[in-house]
């Protein structure tokens, strides 16, 4: 059993508590989902559960927290590790080795398990997670979704009693989410206690015992799946949570010219790329025309070449025979870089400044739009914060703001709703629609069904 009693925590650099007055009990074998707006305190709760608070994140922790009445906030971190498996919002932050096989072995080696047991667990886990084909791969060659699956498999290698997952579906394609759902179903059948922090709720409605809505650092409401499904739409929107019933709209609107936009096209031909040592092309594009008249969604399985494709459009991959033209003007590699802006899947790679205000203005060609973008993306309270102190969803919104202010003609979003709640997803849709009114070509890589249905008019399957 996991138990919080009157728990409060304030990070050292902040004056406002991240969580307060938390009374929360999870019984052995329960499946609990924590959801709510980005930055509401969900990740802070998970850091207490896995011992990272106060071990790595310093601050004032009050109240009582315990696991099976034997582990508490004063316990050593290794005691948590043996009981609690953790998957972080950004899986890269929990990798220790450079190849998949070693990464799976590392947790067991770290506690001194016998070599034969480790080999048996790797075989068993690889089969269960269907990742046998990835065992000889290096970590740097994996897609974001593949890294997510490896992170979950690695966390399970010690066979913990409690598994805490922070946004496990954020980088997964539709097929991989189905696979994750099956794995979680098996965990529940095996009596594993599962606590998931998640915004995408549709794949969890048949698994969760209950959903907790976190708001402003407190546990606001508790719902069973049926209660949440039957919640009136206006109440769901007010809570800032995603829909539980969802299907992909395969009949997205046909591309239509917009009379309000000056036509801008990116003509692509002979765009083929194969990674070194790979036996097949990452993608092959004989001919393609992209336009600012529609918002284009790039969809496909994890590892299908989506990110590589857009990197090539940005001039970040060397493709000698390719031709890319903007309104019939052939672009060099440097011109491609100058005309394009990519919001990365992992936005930590593109946040450089000491506060959000400077970050937004770093390469802004349209600084006069700062106030409007800050208001639409709800960044006012974050302007003087260091980007590293923000939640994943908050970082994502800052990167999107930087993209809009850059004034570039081709803007690419790689999973822009990763880590975003319904409220902020709707804000991203609004700002993308605003951007669509300008002379800008917009490409969106996404596995987010709800977001794709509401934002894109043209799907391209890689």
Image: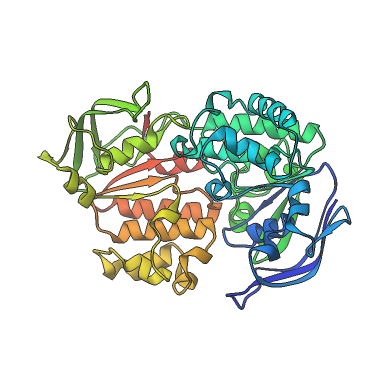
**Residue 144 locus on image (x, y percent):** 48, 40
Q: Which residue is situated farthest in the top direction here?
A: 279
Q: Which residue is situated farthest in the right direction here?
A: 69
Q: Is residue 319 visible?
A: yes
Q: Is residue 336 left or right of residue 94?
A: left
The image shows a total of numbered marks equal to 0
Would you place residue 73 above or below residue 83 in this image?
Answer: below
Q: Can residue 457 be seen in this view?
A: no
**Residue 97 locus on image (x, y percent):** 55, 42
Q: In this view, does 99 lie to the left or right of 160?
A: left
Q: Which residue is situated farthest in the bottom direction here?
A: 15
User: Which quadrant of the structure image shows residue 156?
Assistant: top right
User: Along the line of sight, which residue is nearer the eye, 56 or 332?
Assistant: 56
User: Along the line of sight, which residue is nearer the eye, 27 or 137?
Assistant: 137
Query: Residue at the spot x=72%, y=60% of the render?
Result: 48
Would you place residue 12 above or below residue 427 in this image?
Answer: below
User: Which quadrant of the structure image shows residue 311?
Assistant: top left
**Residue 386 locus on image (x, y percent):** 47, 69
Query: Residue at the spot x=53%, y=32% of the render?
Result: 174
Which quarter of the rendered picture does the C terminus lie within? Answer: top left
Query: Residue at the spot x=72%, y=35% of the render?
Result: 206
User: Along the line of sight, which residue is nearer the eye, 42 or 47?
Assistant: 47
Query: Residue at the spot x=52%, y=28% of the render?
Result: 136
Would you place residue 285 above or below residue 35 in this image?
Answer: above
Color style of the picture: rainbow
**Residue 4 locus on image (x, y percent):** 81, 61
User: Which quadrant of the structure image shows residue 244?
Assistant: top right
Q: Is residue 73 left or right of residue 198?
A: right
């Amino acid at each position: 059993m996991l138990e919080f009693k009157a728990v409060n925590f304030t990070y050292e650099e902040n004056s406002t508590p991240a969580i307060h007055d938390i009374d929360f009990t999870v019984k052995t074998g329960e499946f609990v989902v924590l959801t709510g707006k980005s930055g509401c305190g969900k990740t802070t709760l998970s850091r207490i559960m896995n011992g990272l608070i106060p071990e790595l994140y310093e601050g004032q922790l009050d109240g009582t927290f315990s696991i099976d009445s034997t582990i508490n906030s004063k316990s050593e971190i290794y005691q948590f590790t043996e009981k609690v498996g953790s998957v972080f919002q950004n899986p890269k932050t929990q990798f220790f080795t450079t190849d998949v096989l070693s990464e799976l072995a590392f947790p067991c080696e770290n506690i001194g398990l016998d070599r034969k047991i480790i080999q048996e667990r790797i075989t068993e886990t690889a089969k269960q997670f269907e990742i046998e084909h990835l065992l000889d791969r290096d970590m740097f060659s994996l897609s974001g979704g593949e890294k997510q699956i490896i992170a979950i498999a690695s966390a399970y290698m010690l066979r913990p009693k409690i598994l805490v997952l922070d946004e496990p579906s954020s980088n997964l394609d539709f097929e991989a989410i189905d696979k994750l759902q099956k794995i979680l179903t098996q965990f529940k059948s095996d009596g594993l206690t599962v606590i998931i922090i998640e915004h995408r709720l549709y794949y969890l409605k048949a698994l969760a015992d209950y959903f907790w809505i976190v708001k402003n650092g407190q546990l606001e409401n508790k719902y069973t799946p049926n209660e949440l499904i039957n919640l009136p739409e206006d109440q769901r929107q007010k809570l800032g949570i995603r829909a539980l019933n969802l299907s992909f709209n395969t009949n997205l609107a046909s591309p239509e010219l917009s009379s309000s936009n000056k036509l801008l096209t990116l003509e692509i031909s002979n765009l083929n790329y194969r990674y070194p040592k790979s036996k097949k092309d990452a993608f092959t594009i004989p001919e393609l025309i992209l336009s600012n008249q529609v918002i284009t969604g790039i969809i496909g399985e994890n590892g299908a070449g989506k990110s590589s494709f857009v990197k090539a459009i940005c001039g970040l991959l060397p493709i000698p025979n390719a031709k890319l033209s903007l309104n019939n003007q052939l672009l060099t590699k440097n011109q491609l870089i100058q005309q394009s802006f990519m919001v990365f899947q992992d936005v930590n790679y593109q946040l450089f400044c000491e506060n959000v205000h400077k970050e937004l203005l770093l390469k802004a060609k349209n600084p006069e739009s700062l106030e409007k973008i800050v208001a639409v993306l709800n960044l006012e309270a974050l302007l003087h914060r260091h980007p590293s102190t923000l939640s994943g969803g908050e970082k994502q919104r800052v990167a999107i703001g930087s993209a809009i202010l850059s004034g570039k003609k081709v803007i690419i979003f790689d999973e822009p709703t990763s880590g975003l709640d319904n409220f902020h997803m709707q804000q991203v849709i609004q700002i993308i629609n605003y951007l669509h009114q300008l002379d800008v070509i917009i490409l969106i890589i996404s596995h987010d069904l709800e977001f794709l249905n509401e934002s894109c008019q043209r799907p391209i399957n890689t």
